[in-house]
Amino acid sequence: CDAQCPHDIKYIDGESNLLDWTPSTSDPSSGRGRYGSCCVETDLWEANKIATAFTPHSCSIEEAFRCEGIDCGDTEAGERFKGVCDKNGCDFQPFRLGNESFYGPGDGFVIDTSKKVTVITQFITADGTDDGPLVEIRRVYEQDGRAVANP
């Protein structure tokens, strides 16, 4: 499952997703069934040498959920923003947020992607425990002996 609530999952919660199954025309082992499989998703590291982003996708459900109809938020049905999950998510991408010299190849960038970099993502909870309520997500880059917070 993920926040896109994909319909190509063959088994959801131990049940086959055979109802209304339509085989893919381009992939013989894929297709689309009536049900989707939704859950909270976090894209921790979407990056290359030019751009970086991390994107939390929240959902109104708290665990994996078999969706049907409007709950799936299917784009092709015009319901993308009506489902139980935020398919677009809330990404943190420095360039798009206005910092055009934060991340990229060369010494003109705060984080020079032509060098080794360590990326740290921290999930901060209200009570400091591993399973407390999430209150913040922090991204820190370590390079050349320095720690640089996500701008």
Image (tube, rainbow, N blue to C red):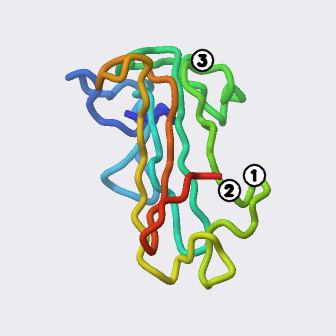
- Looking at the rendered structure, the kind of residue marked 1 is Leu
Question: At 25% across and 21% down in the image, what residue appears?
Answer: 13
- Identify whether 20 is placed above or below 27: above
For the residues marked 1 and 2, what is the alpha-carbon distance in whole angstroms? 5 Å
Residue count near mark 1 (Cα–Cα under 10 Å), binned few <14, some 14–19, many ≥20: few
- Disc 1 secondary structure class: loop
Q: Which mark is residue 97?
A: 1
How far across and down, in percent of the image, does residue 3 sit?
49, 33
- Residue 126 in the image: state x and y as whole percent: 44, 18
| Residues at circles 1 and 2 in contact by the CB criterion of under 8 Å | yes
Q: In this figure, which residue is indicated by the disc labeled 3?
A: 70
Of the image marks 3 and 2, the number of the one nearer the N terminus: 3
What is the three-letter code of the residue carrying label 3? Ile
* Residue linked to disc 2: 94
Q: Is residue 14 left or right of residue 80?
A: left
Whether tag 3 and tag 2 are in contact, CB under 8 A, the answer is no
Height in image: 24 above or below 143?
above
Q: Nearer the viewer, residue 145 or 118?
A: 145
Q: Nearer the viewer, mark 3 or mark 2?
A: 2
Q: Amino acid at mark 2?
A: Pro
The crowding category of the residue bearing disc 2, from other C-alpha atoms within 10 Å (few below 14, some 14 to 19, many at least 20), is some
The residue lying at 42 percent from left, 47 percent from top is 121
Please state which of the two labelled residues, at mark 1 or mark 3, is closer to the viewer: 1
Identify which residue is drawn at 50% across, 42% down: 138
Q: Which numbered marker is on residue 118?
A: none
Q: Earlier in the sequence, mark 1 or mark 3?
A: 3
Residue shown at 53%/27% (left/top)?
58
Secondary structure beneath disc 2? loop
